[in-house]
Protein backbone atom coordinates (compact mmCIF):
# COMPACT_ATOMS: atom_id res chain seq x y z
CA UNK A 1 0.00 0.00 0.00
CA UNK A 2 1.32 3.46 -0.91
CA UNK A 3 2.53 5.57 1.99
CA UNK A 4 3.04 9.31 2.41
CA UNK A 5 6.26 10.23 4.21
CA UNK A 6 7.14 13.63 5.64
CA UNK A 7 10.69 14.18 6.89
CA UNK A 8 11.46 17.31 8.94
CA UNK A 9 15.18 18.12 8.94
CA UNK A 10 15.60 20.73 11.71
CA UNK A 11 18.90 22.61 11.68
CA UNK A 12 19.77 21.48 8.15
CA UNK A 13 20.05 23.58 4.99
CA UNK A 14 18.83 23.30 1.42
CA UNK A 15 22.50 23.31 0.37
CA UNK A 16 22.99 20.13 2.42
CA UNK A 17 19.85 18.65 0.85
CA UNK A 18 21.25 19.43 -2.64
CA UNK A 19 24.50 17.70 -1.71
CA UNK A 20 22.63 14.57 -0.56
CA UNK A 21 20.61 14.48 -3.78
CA UNK A 22 23.82 14.78 -5.82
CA UNK A 23 25.47 11.95 -3.85
CA UNK A 24 22.42 9.78 -4.59
CA UNK A 25 22.86 10.45 -8.31
CA UNK A 26 19.55 12.28 -8.74
CA UNK A 27 18.93 15.58 -10.51
CA UNK A 28 16.15 18.17 -10.08
CA UNK A 29 13.07 17.21 -12.09
CA UNK A 30 14.51 13.77 -12.83
CA UNK A 31 13.30 10.31 -11.88
CA UNK A 32 12.96 9.29 -8.22
CA UNK A 33 14.42 6.30 -6.42
CA UNK A 34 12.96 2.90 -7.28
CA UNK A 35 9.72 2.69 -5.30
CA UNK A 36 9.54 6.45 -4.87
CA UNK A 37 6.40 7.76 -6.54
CA UNK A 38 6.55 11.48 -5.73
CA UNK A 39 9.04 13.84 -4.03
CA UNK A 40 9.26 17.52 -3.22
CA UNK A 41 11.17 19.66 -0.73
CA UNK A 42 10.76 23.10 0.80
CA UNK A 43 12.63 25.36 3.20
CA UNK A 44 11.11 25.75 6.66
CA UNK A 45 11.83 28.25 9.42
CA UNK A 46 14.14 25.73 11.10
CA UNK A 47 15.52 23.67 8.23
CA UNK A 48 13.77 21.85 5.40
CA UNK A 49 10.87 19.44 4.83
CA UNK A 50 10.75 16.53 2.38
CA UNK A 51 7.35 15.19 1.33
CA UNK A 52 7.24 11.87 -0.50
CA UNK A 53 4.88 9.14 -1.63
CA UNK A 54 6.42 5.66 -1.72
CA UNK A 55 5.13 2.35 -3.06
CA UNK A 56 5.22 1.00 0.53
CA UNK A 57 6.79 1.77 3.89
CA UNK A 58 9.33 -1.05 3.70
CA UNK A 59 10.82 0.29 0.46
CA UNK A 60 11.15 3.76 1.99
CA UNK A 61 12.72 2.43 5.19
CA UNK A 62 15.30 0.42 3.23
CA UNK A 63 16.17 3.50 1.13
CA UNK A 64 16.40 5.66 4.26
CA UNK A 65 18.76 3.20 5.95
CA UNK A 66 20.97 2.66 2.89
CA UNK A 67 21.06 6.19 1.48
CA UNK A 68 19.31 9.00 3.36
CA UNK A 69 21.01 8.33 6.69
CA UNK A 70 24.57 7.75 5.46
CA UNK A 71 24.58 10.58 2.89
CA UNK A 72 22.99 13.02 5.34
CA UNK A 73 25.76 12.28 7.83
CA UNK A 74 28.41 12.76 5.11
CA UNK A 75 27.20 16.31 4.41
CA UNK A 76 27.06 17.27 8.08
CA UNK A 77 23.40 16.76 8.94
CA UNK A 78 23.82 15.63 12.53
CA UNK A 79 20.21 15.29 13.70
CA UNK A 80 18.02 12.52 12.27
CA UNK A 81 14.81 13.80 10.71
CA UNK A 82 11.46 13.63 12.41
CA UNK A 83 9.49 11.22 10.20
CA UNK A 84 5.70 10.99 9.87
CA UNK A 85 3.86 8.33 7.86
CA UNK A 86 0.42 8.69 6.28
CA UNK A 87 -1.89 6.19 4.59
CA UNK A 88 -2.40 7.25 0.97
CA UNK A 89 -5.96 6.98 -0.27
CA UNK A 90 -5.03 8.01 -3.84
CA UNK A 91 -2.23 9.60 -5.83
CA UNK A 92 -1.92 10.83 -9.40
CA UNK A 93 1.10 10.87 -11.69
CA UNK A 94 2.10 12.80 -14.81
CA UNK A 95 0.28 11.58 -17.91
Image (cartoon, rainbow, N blue to C red):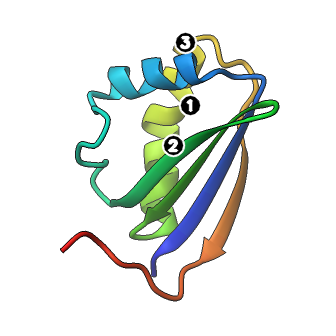
Residue occupying the far bottom of the picture: 89
Residue 53, image x, y percentages: 47, 64
Q: Is residue 81 above or below residue 84?
A: above
For the residues labelled 3 and 1, say whether their Cβ atoms are less than 8 Å apart: no
Residue position for label 3:
75
Distance, label 1 to label 2, CA atoms, is 6 Å
Q: Quadrant of residue 13?
A: top right
For the residues labelled 1 and 2, say whether their Cβ atoms are less than 8 Å apart: yes
Q: Residues within 10 Å of mark 2 (few under 14, many from 20)?
A: some
Residue position for label 1:
69
Q: Nearer the viewer, mark 3 or mark 1?
A: 3
Q: Nearer the viewer, mark 3 or mark 2?
A: 3
What residue do we see at 44% from left, 33% from top? 67
- State which quarter of the image contains the C terminus: bottom left
Residue nearer the viewer, 59 or 15: 15
Residue 68, image x, y percentages: 50, 34
Residue 71, image x, y percentages: 48, 22
What residue do we see at 65% from left, 73% from top? 86
Residue 42 in the figure: left or right of residue 52: right
What residue do we see at 26% from left, 27% from top? 25
Residue nearer the viewer, 13 or 73: 13
Residue position for label 2:
64
Residue nearer the viewer, 82 or 31: 31
Residue 57 in the figure: left or right of residue 94: right
Q: Identify the mark nearer the N-term, 3 or 1.
A: 1
Amino acid sequence: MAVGVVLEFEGATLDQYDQVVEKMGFSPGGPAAPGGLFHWVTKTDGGFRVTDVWRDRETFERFAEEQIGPYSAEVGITNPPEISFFEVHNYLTAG
